Image (cartoon, coloured by chain):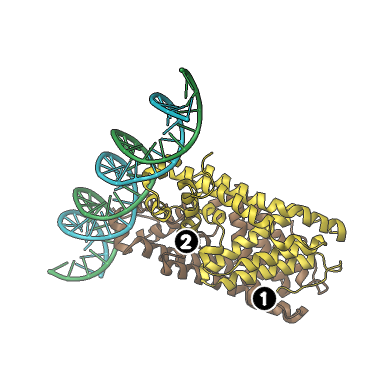
Chain colours: A yellow, B brown, C cyan, D green
Amino acid sequence: MTQAGSRVSARDKLLDAALKIVRAKGYSATNVDEICAEAGVTKGGFFHHFKSKEDWAVAAANHWSETTAGLFAEAPYHQPADPLQRVLAYVAFRKDLVAGELAEFSCLLGTMTQEVFGTSPAIQSACWQGIAGHADTLVADIQAAMDTYGSDGSWTAQSLALHTQAVLQGAFILAKASGDPQQAKDSIDHLYRYIELLFRGAGTVDTAAT
Amino acid sequence: MTQAGSRVSARDKLLDAALKIVRAKGYSATNVDEICAEAGVTKGGFFHHFKSKEDWAVAAANHWSETTAGLFAEAPYHQPADPLQRVLAYVAFRKDLVAGELAEFSCLLGTMTQEVFGTSPAIQSACWQGIAGHADTLVADIQAAMDTYGSDGSWTAQSLALHTQAVLQGAFILAKASGDPQQAKDSIDHLYRYIELLFRGAGTVDTAAT
DNA sequence: ACGTAAATACCGACCGGTTGGTATTTAAAG
DNA sequence: CTTTAAATACCAACCGGTCGGTATTTACGT
């Protein structure tokens, strides 16, 4: 509702600041002054755009969901003709994203969820929508793989899609606890192997996750 | 005002309060007054036993690790003669623990890790020691299963043990985000299936996870 | 095209309740 | 009498949020 091309609005800068600060310090430990300093905006500007810190967090969660949705939509893992290969390529892509600083590759939604699930239904809901919405983007490929290669009927495409998100979130926690990103990669390797095994005997080309 | 009867020290009550409050609200959002109120101790008592809130959190993390270690040591999943069955029974046991309120079955260490990994090395370290130490209790059984039934050499017992913890932590996040414990159970089912598949063809008795 | 009024964006000083932590005091134990 | 445990009173910094005001854009009548 504002904003032509060049200059970035204060609102956007405040939203971008969330990605950086909240992932590094968590939601509660992040104070408004700090957000403003990071964004180069004053407190008055903050409360002009958001009626509360909670309101800002909800907007930040949605902003994150939209931003990452764009990133994943254009990622190369959609290229393989085989649906199973697309799913495996997704997992490999997620593993590749694990690089650099911990706060840079972890998920804003998972980080906030733990802190607010009992105190802020609004933020919690925004986080869940983002996570579940992202998982939904995997369902079609998983289902296609099930249709193509068969499955034993003991699980659904959606539950596997959500499981991938659980593994990723858990992988981030191990990385944060240990201080070692490799810890996350190791867990993602297990996820990759699991999906291979689910379709083993089918036409898996078997590209090992390095 | 010494309590007659069930003589629990103020220190222990403060530590127990951590389990309840931190898991429900997170570390940063938990304030000392609230801890004291929950424990039935005054602020003076709190700072008599802990030199700071951070010090208390470190003690709480260690307290948690010790308490749960006792719980798991005496749990029935060690009974099966077959090592693979013991591992699977462990996963099933973890699934059974998912019951009641979210804050009651989730992990204190995973919850705190996300908030403090960038700000408190002391708490972070205590969390990692607890998680890694618990994972270590699974390594012998996993290794024995590998020795008994073979493995393709692409993964280690320790990495699988840590992966189980990653899945559990991630499962808790999905449960918290969605507000539905079943979300966690579904993910744990996938973990169970993964371990079965890793040893498929071996002497798996195949007890389906309900 | 132009003046103007209203809306929007943004600023920064300030407020009052909260928070982690301290200083002092009292109670009980050995 | 000394040590340890725990309570009361208190504080200074902090933090989310408010408020009055200014700069900039948009809407519109003429």
Closer to the camera: disc 2 or disc 1? 2
Are the residues under badges 2 and 1 in a single subunit? no
Q: Residue at x 48, y 49 (%)?
A: A7
**Rendered view: A194 above or below B28:** below
Q: Amino acid at mark 1?
A: Asp
Number of callouts? 2
Horizontal side of A32 relative to A143 (left or right) equals left
Q: Quadrant of the N terminus of chain A?
A: top right
**Rendered view: B179 above or below A194:** above
The chain identifier of the residue carrying mark 2 reads: A
Residue named by callout 2: A24
Q: Residue B158 location, x and y as percent?
A: 63, 76
Horizontal side of B162 relative to A49 (left or right) equals right
Q: Residue at x 59, y 72 (%)?
A: A183
Are there few (<14), some (14-19), or many (20+) residues within 10 Å of tag 2? many
* Image disc number at residue B141: 1
Q: Residue A68 location, x and y as percent?
A: 61, 55
Judge whether residue A28 can be spotted in this image. Answer: yes
Q: Residue A173 location, x and y as percent?
A: 55, 64
Q: Nearer the viewer, residue B16 or A111?
A: A111
**Callout 2 touching callout 1 (CB < 8 Å):** no
The chain identifier of the residue carrying mark 1 reads: B
Q: Nearer the viewer, residue A108 or C22?
A: A108
Judge whether residue A51 can be spotted in this image. Answer: no
Where disc 2 sits, the SS reads helix
Q: Amino acid at mark 2?
A: Ala
Q: CA distance from mark 2 to mark 1?
A: 36 Å
Are there few (<14), some (14-19), or many (20+) residues within 10 Å of tag 1? many
Q: Nearer the viewer, residue A95 or B160?
A: A95
Where disc 1 sits, the SS reads helix
Q: Quadrant of the C terminus of chain A?
A: bottom right
